[in-house]
Image (cartoon, helix red, strand yellow):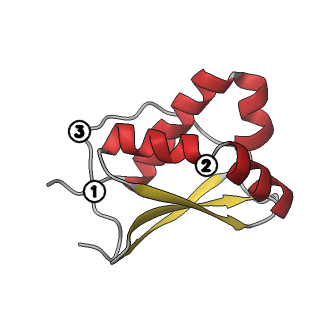
Amino acid sequence: MADLDFEGLWKETLVQLRNYLGEEEFSGWFSDMKYLRCSSTDAGNSIIAGIPSAFHRDKVSFHYKKQITSIFKKISGQDIDFEMEIIGKTAKKAEIPSYSSKKRRACPGNA
C-alpha cells in the first residue's frame, strides 16, 4: 500500500468541510486551524491540527470530529483519528488547495 499524504488528506478534508458547511460556518471554526503533524502508533494513525483555543477545541470536537474522521476514512480508506492542540491565534488562515489522491508520501518517522 502506498504511503498516505496526511497533510494532503487534511487539506482535502477542509475542502469537503467548506463545501458542506458553507463559507460562514467553515470560516468560524476552521480558518484559524492548521495542520501540525501526523502521528503513528500501534493503535493507529492520527492527524493533529493546531487550534486557537480550548473553546474552539471543545466545539470542534463535539460538533465536527465525527464528520472529520468520516471524511478521512472516505478519502483514505483508513481509520484515522483527529486530534487538536491549542496553539493560540498564530495559525495562518486555512489555505484550501485541491488534493490529488494519487500524490502520497509517508508520515515523517514512519518510512
Residue type at numbered disc 2? Lys
Q: Which residue is mark 1?
A: 105
Instruction: Please give the name of the residue rendered at 23% of the width and 72% of the height, measured from the top-left corner.
Output: 111
- Of residues 74 and 4, the one nearer the viewer is 74
User: How far is mark 1 from mark 2, CA to CA?
Assistant: 24 Å
Residue type at numbered disc 3? Lys
How crowded pointer 2 is (Cα within 10 Å; few <14, some 14-19, many 20+) is rated as: some
Q: Residue 21: percent from the left, percent from the top?
A: 67, 25
- Of residues 82 and 34, the one nearer the viewer is 82
Q: Which residue is mark 2?
A: 65
Q: Which residue is mark 3?
A: 102
Sequence-first disc among 2 and 3: 2
Instruction: Please give the name of the residue rendered at 74% of the width and 67% of the height, measured from the top-left corner.
Output: 86
How crowded pointer 1 is (Cα within 10 Å; few <14, some 14-19, many 20+) is rated as: some
Instruction: Please give the name of the residue rendered at 42% of the width and 56% of the height, measured from the top-left corner.
Output: 80
As displayed, is residue 109 above or below residue 2?
A: below
User: How far is mark 2 from mark 3, CA to CA?
Assistant: 25 Å
Q: Residue 42: percent from the left, percent from the top?
A: 33, 78
Q: Tell which tag, 2 or 3, sits nearer the viewer.
A: 2
Sequence-first disc among 1 and 2: 2
